[in-house]
Image (spheres, rainbow, N blue to C red):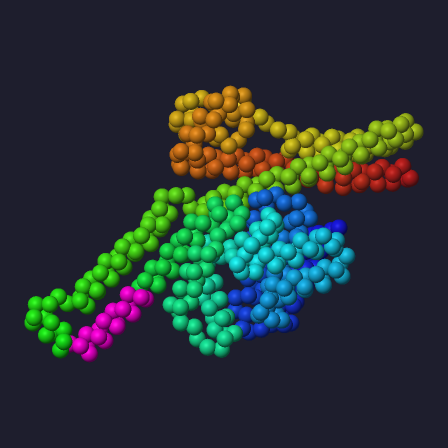
Amino acid sequence: MNYLELLDQIRAHVAISFQTKNDDRLLYHNLLHTEQVVKAVVKIGNHYKLSDQDFFVVNAAAWFHDTGYLTSFEHHEDTGARSARDFLATKSVEPAVIDAIANCILATKMPQHPVTLLEQIVCDADLFHLGGDDFKERNKLMRKEAEACKGKDIDKNLWRIKTIELFASHEYHTDYCKELLTAGKERNLAELKEKSLKEEHKHNKDADKHDAASGKHNKDSGRDNGEPDKHQEGDKKQKEEYDLVSTVSAEPKKKKSDRPDRGIETMFRTTSGNHQRLSDMADNKAHIMISTNSIILSVILSILLRKLEDNPYLILPTLLLLIICVVTMVFSILATRPSVPPGTFTADEVKDKKVNLLFFGNFYNMSLVDYQAGMLAMMDDRDFLYGSLVKDLYGQGVVLGRKYRLLRIAYNVFMFGIVASVLAFIIASTLKAL
């Protein structure tokens, strides 16, 4: 089964459904949210290197998981699972695959209780924004959607408290999301708590002012009798508690500046993956050139050369075609020919942070003990680690540049050479006819 083609059909079907059954109240659970969940599913699925079938399962579940909102806000997971079953049944998808997709959708029901890895991936993708940088915007949209559905305003502080309760009861299920999003989730939770505490402090302060205005005479009497001002003590205590919590809430932000930025890590991972894909594309292009010219050479050597004695006028065109094919093959082979360094490094290179331990060509002739010592030194030094990643990306870029430069020469030689060879055969045949 062609899963990629089927995913395109699912994407088109879901997009059309959101457009034709548009509900103005769906400010959060709309096509944008669905696309963001799909994007998160792809990211998590790539990390776990899912099979084609499993990758299809989590992607299809992500596309259908909120389609139930188009029909009913209640039990939308059940409705979405039914929609997925109905659509996939018309595409002759295996029942086991349909069941897996439906289970992934149902697993997103709160509180989440995913069982399989695929269900965990979809659940984590659905709440991916809790640990993301766009949490504030997404949370505001969710509150506005809830207000639109209920037909009345929802107190911001009450919504904030409910969100804090959600954070307290939620945890990511996959190890990848725990590592990637926990810090961001804690940061978002700390900001929520800080705002909630400020609101509570403001409310208590306003209440104290009201009490002070209504009981000013009694308070003045109490002061005359030497009694302590309980309200002032309460305000002081509240301020101390607020300062303490604010300090604690600010700690994650301070720690964040001491640790690598997740955006940088994502950039390195994405760029390295892009370089690898470009390298694979270059190898495929070279393989096409080598295969094509091998076939042409086989024809020339097996058929055409034997007929040159009877057709001497074809000697020059044949030699031209032969040279073109050989030159093209040489440049294509050069583009894919590996260049391997000595595979050793010294302790001084590790100390001076000059060696890239992420490339096998720099350590394959070293002992495990030496390589492990070098890696531990690199992992303990952020500058060394990120410097090695930069060197690795640069090295990949240099290799890619060489590959594509040689490939361009090979393709140009082949393109112009074929044209020249065909023209040569035409001219030779024309002159022979004359």
Q: Report the predominant secondary structure element of the magenta stretch.
A: helix
* Residue 434 in the image: above or below residue 207: above
- Where on the picture, by quarter, is residue 310? top right
Compared with residue 129, is residue 399 higher up or lower down, i.e. above or below? above
- Front residue of 49/227: it is 227
Q: Locate residue 304, reporting x and y percent.
A: 87, 31
In the visual, does 67 lie left or right of 146? right
Q: In this view of the protein, which residue sits in the foreground, 233 or 127?
A: 233
Q: Which residues lie in the magenta part?
A: 199-216
Q: Can residue 62 be seen? A: no
In x, y percent, where is residue 345? 47, 23
The residue under the point 50% across, 75% down is 150
Residue for point 18% across, 63% down: 233
Q: Place residue 22 in its image quadrant.
A: bottom right
Which quarter shows the C terminus?
top right
- Seen from the viewer's position, the closer of residues 263 and 42 is 42
**Where residue 381 sits in the image (x, y, percent)?**
39, 34
Q: Is residue 252 visible?
A: yes
Residue 234 at x, y = what percent? 21, 64
Give me the residue at 41% from left, 29% from top.
377
Tell me the quarter of the picture where residue 347 sits.
top left
Q: Is residue 129 above or below residue 71?
A: above
Question: What residue appears at the point 31 percent right and 64 percent down from the top-left corner?
Answer: 198
Nearest the eye: 278 or 100: 100
Q: Is residue 201 magenta?
A: yes
Q: Is residue 351 left or right of residue 82?
A: left
The verdict on residue 280 being magenta is: no
The relative height of residue 220 versus residue 32 in the rendered view (above or below) is below
Numbered circles on residues, count: 0
